[in-house]
Image: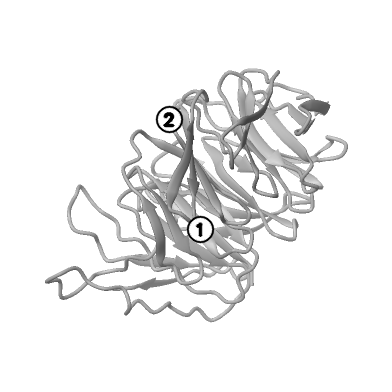
Amino acid sequence: MKILWTVRHFSALVLLFPLTAVDAAQPSQGDDPLPTDAVLRLGSLRLRHKGGIHALALSRDGSLLASAGQDLAVRLWDARTFKAVANVEGSGGMLGAVALAPDGKTVAWRNQGRVVIWDVATRKQRFVLDGHGNWRPRLVFSHDGSTLAVPCGDGRVRLWNVATGKSEGVLEGHTKGAVGVAFAADGKTLLTLDAVGSVSFWDWPSGKRLRQLPATEELPANQLLVSPDGSTLAIAGAPTSWTDKEPIVLRLLDASTGKERWRIAYAQQYPAALAFSPDSKNLVVSVDGLVKSADHPLEVRDAATGKLLRTLAGHDHETGVTDLVFNPMARRFIPAAAMARFVSGTLPMAARAVISSVTRARPRRGVFA
């Protein structure tokens, strides 16, 4: 069973979408103790922040989930029971991307111009790394979890040893800033994306640029994703302002040749988050919009042709999905105990989970109270 994790920005909600039709089972919540003198809880403590969520990350075995939220907290969750494993509260300053080492031993996140490295086993901060600029692109761990690649606003990508906190090198020469990084399937090559859509391939231990796929036209870019089999690159952009009228383009390229396979131009919308399915056959796109009244769907597309296979609707401006993570190891589907939504500091509304099957595209909705 393959599971797609999503986060809704304003509702502080984690949703799970199964990619095959199965019977949904709700996890037991009876062992979550109530506060002193409390007699009833509406909703659940599972998968909950006090505000919107910016980013998700999942360990390679699918057992540990990390989330970064507007409440300035980074939280770790058991991805099987949805229980909180650890909370890092009050980090100070807006949090950006979060990354989890494949082995689940190290968490890293952006905190304005700093990057925090945190040890999961000891529940302690290892290092705070400065000098990255107030930049928010995704950061990634190497396949062995020893190195963290961090794009910077000055056009560099900095490499850090997460055990020692020492620099392992700097990759330079990115036009208008480095906006995306991804390790290739072989684990030996690091791909970087600049702001105009050029992709560079690096032998990251030596810092040598192996080759470059130059942008054939200057298109705004801020996301780079490599398919799990390493054959395909997904490159997407975002509007430079909320009044931007230019279409935002999503492109899929052959990773070997750089040849464009297909593209889609979004008008008054843009791809806010991307995720390849574990078999690399499908690409899921969270479509956000510049118009508040517009629907913000999840699109499931054929990665080879771009054909739209399914649309998962029901997301509006306040519940748009801000990040997507597949869990390829899940054997059964358990609906997320939705995070209760806070409205203007009042008591939480009843928690709601939305469960949708990509194969059937028929959402099932339930309120857990």
Secondary structure, mark 2, is loop
Q: Nearer the viewer, residue 178 or 10?
A: 178
- Picture disc at residue 8: none
Q: Earlier in the sequence, mark 2 or mark 1?
A: 1
Q: Is 279 above or below relative to 357?
A: above
- Residue 227: x and y in percent read 73, 49
Side (left or right) of 295 relative to 35: right
Which residue shows up at 61% across the image and 47% down it?
Answer: 274
Side (left or right) of 367 relative to 137: left
Q: Nearer the viewer, residue 84 or 319?
A: 84
- Residue 303: x and y in percent read 74, 51
Q: Is 265 above or below relative to 176?
A: below
Q: Which residue is mark 1?
A: 65
- Residue 132: x and y in percent read 52, 25
Side (left or right) of 68 relative to 200: left
Q: Is 62 above or below relative to 266?
A: below
- Badge 2: few (under 14), some or many (20 or more) residues near its Cα, within 10 Å? some
The quarter of the picture where the C terminus appears is bottom left
| Residue type (three-letter) at the residue carrying disc 2 | Gln
State how far apart marks 2 and 1 are (Cα): 22 Å
Q: Please say whether residue 235 is visible from this viewpoint.
A: no
Display colour scheme: one colour
- Picture disc at residue 112: 2
